[in-house]
Amino acid sequence: MKKVLIINGPNLNMQGSREQDIYGTFTLDDLQSKLEIESQKLDLSISILQSNHEGEIIDAIHFARDRFDFIILNAGAYSHYSIAIRDAIDSINIPTIEVHITNIYAREEFRKESVIAPVCKGQICGFGIYSYILAMNYIAQCE
């Protein structure tokens, strides 16, 4: 069974109450429940973390080394400027999939660049909660 660490970055704890027209009405608890159900269907073992703190996210990435097979990361705003998170991903040998709820390329100019994308296996954005599900389906199909 593949082990997957799912990391949600800043402000994801406000999901469901902030900017519902952009992010939707599902909560972080709704997301976690959906991911747990999907992980069982796909025979994946998942651990989920949400943090508003860059250092905690970096620590989680470092901790994943030798413990997880994949990382799914929604780094939120950190995606656009955190060289430290980029370097953390680059320092481990774990395929990381960057996900976003919204299509970052259809939003404000500053959101259109991800500094973490070049060190990730791939990026999935714009499909709401299903960005995570698509990443999980990819992982389930990997040899």
Image (cartoon, rainbow, N blue to C red):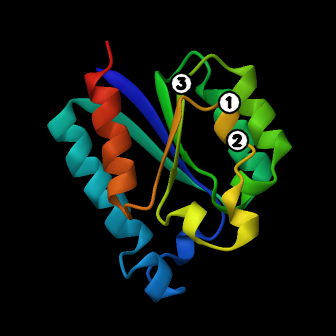
Q: Which residue is mark 3?
A: 95
First of labels 1, 3 by sequence position: 3
Q: Position of residue 47 (x, y in %)?
A: 44, 41
Left or right of residue 21: residue 113: right
Contact between labelled residues 2 and 3, with CB atoms less than 8 Å apart: no
Tell me the SS state at disc 3: loop
- Which amino acid lies under the numbered mark 3 shown in the image of this protein? Pro
The answer to which of 84 and 79 lies nearer the viewer is: 79
Distance from disc 1 to disc 3, alpha carbons, whole Å, reads 9 Å
Q: Is residue 2 left or right of residue 14?
A: left
Q: Which residue lies under the disc numbered 2? A: 116
Q: Residue 119 — which label?
A: 1
Task: Name the quadrant of the C terminus.
Answer: top left
- Could you tell me how far apart the alpha carbons at marks 1 and 2 are, in whole angstroms? 6 Å
Residues at circles 1 and 2 in contact by the CB criterion of under 8 Å = yes
Residue at x 38% of width, y 65% of height: 128
What crowding class fits label 3: few (fewer than 14 Cα within 10 Å), some (14-19), or many (20 or more)?
Answer: some
